[in-house]
Image (cartoon, rainbow, N blue to C red):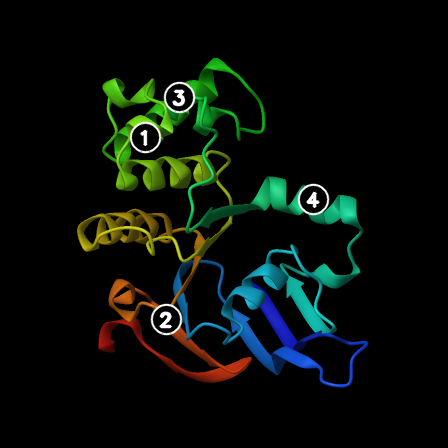
């Protein structure tokens, strides 16, 4: 669970006109479920994700994750947390171009073993990529296949929190909804945070948080969007 208190992110601190990416607000997030964070460009939603995932440190405020004050952790402790408990999916798949789909998933595993190779195959198969796709390089896969491979890579270590920043922005609607189906299934026992500007992909969300100008604009249940 995340407990966020008075989270503030200010850019251009040394200049007369400071930019408040996050304006100072409180927020609590559960241990599991599909949570959508929606807002226009510049609303602060991606900055919030970067702070929660320890990729950025807020200017002020507290972020407590399962009893740990994230802003007080050392660089090494934050790296361990990201490696062991967090997973990341981005708008761009960031697959290694010279590796096969299977190798792109296995390379992110905490350890290389036959067991992890079989797990990677199982993940890919569950996402609709069969044996004929295992050995294809990213350029030989469709956009939807590449993104599903990236999600499999993010899930290989069973992260407790999956951060997805605009994971469907580069996909057509059919592939976008297929990706969201995968994320919804994973959110049954884990926390999945989806950052997006597209309200249509959040129909299955357990909770939707709206952001405007670095602050919370409101919340709705996913089934009423």
Do the residues under discs 4 and 1 have CB atoms within 8 angstroms?
no
The answer to whether residue 69 is seen in the rendering is: no
Q: Which mark's residue is nearer the viewer, 3 or 4?
A: 3
Say which residue appears at 27% left-offset and 23% top-offset: 133
* Mark closer to the chain start, 3 or 4: 4
Circle 2 — which element? strand
Could you say which is closer to the camera, residue 1 or residue 106? 106
Q: From this viewpoint, which residue is outermost toward the left?
A: 174
* Mark closer to the chain start, 3 or 2: 3
Rendered-image quadrant of the C terminus: bottom left
Give the vertical position of 189 relative to 213 (above or below).
above
Could you say which is closer to the camera, residue 159 or residue 215? 215
Query: Percent position (x, y) of residue 147?
Result: 35, 41
Disc 3 to disc 1, C-alpha distance: 12 Å
Circle 3 — which element? loop
* Residue for badge 1: 124
* Residue for badge 2: 207
Q: Which mark's residue is nearer the viewer, 3 or 1?
A: 3
Q: From this viewpoint, which residue is outermost toward the front?
A: 16
* Residue for badge 3: 100
Give the vertical position of 42 relative to 170 (above or below).
below
- Which of the 4 image quarters holds residue 218? bottom left
Rendered-image quadrant of the N terminus: bottom right
Q: Which mark's residue is nearer the viewer, 1 or 2?
A: 1
* Mark closer to the chain start, 1 or 2: 1
Circle 4 — which element? helix
* Residue for badge 4: 79
Q: Which class describes the residues within 10 Å of circle 2: few (<14), some (14-19), or many (20+)?
A: many
In the drawing, what numbered circle is on residue 98? none
């Amino acid at each position: 669970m995340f407990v966020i208190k008075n989270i503030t992110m200010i850019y251009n601190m040394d200049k007369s006109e400071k930019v408040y990416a996050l304006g100072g607000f409180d927020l609590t997030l559960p241990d599991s479920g599909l949570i959508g964070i929606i807002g226009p460009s510049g609303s602060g939603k991606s900055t919030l994700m970067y702070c929660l995932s320890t990729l950025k440190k807020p200017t002020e405020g507290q972020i407590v994750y399962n009893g740990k004050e994230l802003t007080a952790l050392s660089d090494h402790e934050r790296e361990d947390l990201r490696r062991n408990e967090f997973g990341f999916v981005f708008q761009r798949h960031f697959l290694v171009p010279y590796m096969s789909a299977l190798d792109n998933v296995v390379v992110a595993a905490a350890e290389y073993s036959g067991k992890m190779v079989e797990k990677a195959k199982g993940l890919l198969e569950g996402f609709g990529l069969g044996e004929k796709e295992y050995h294809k390089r990213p350029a030989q896969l469709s956009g939807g296949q590449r993104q599903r491979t990236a999600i499999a890579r993010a899930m290989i270590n069973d992260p407790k929190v999956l951060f997805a920043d605009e994971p469907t922005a580069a996909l057509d609607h059919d592939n976008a909804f297929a990706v969201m189906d995968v994320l919804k299934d994973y959110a049954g026992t884990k926390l999945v945070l989806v950052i997006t500007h597209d309200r249509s992909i959040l129909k299955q969300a357990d909770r939707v948080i709206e952001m405007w100008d670095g602050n919370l604009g409101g919340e709705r249940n996913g089934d009423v969007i």
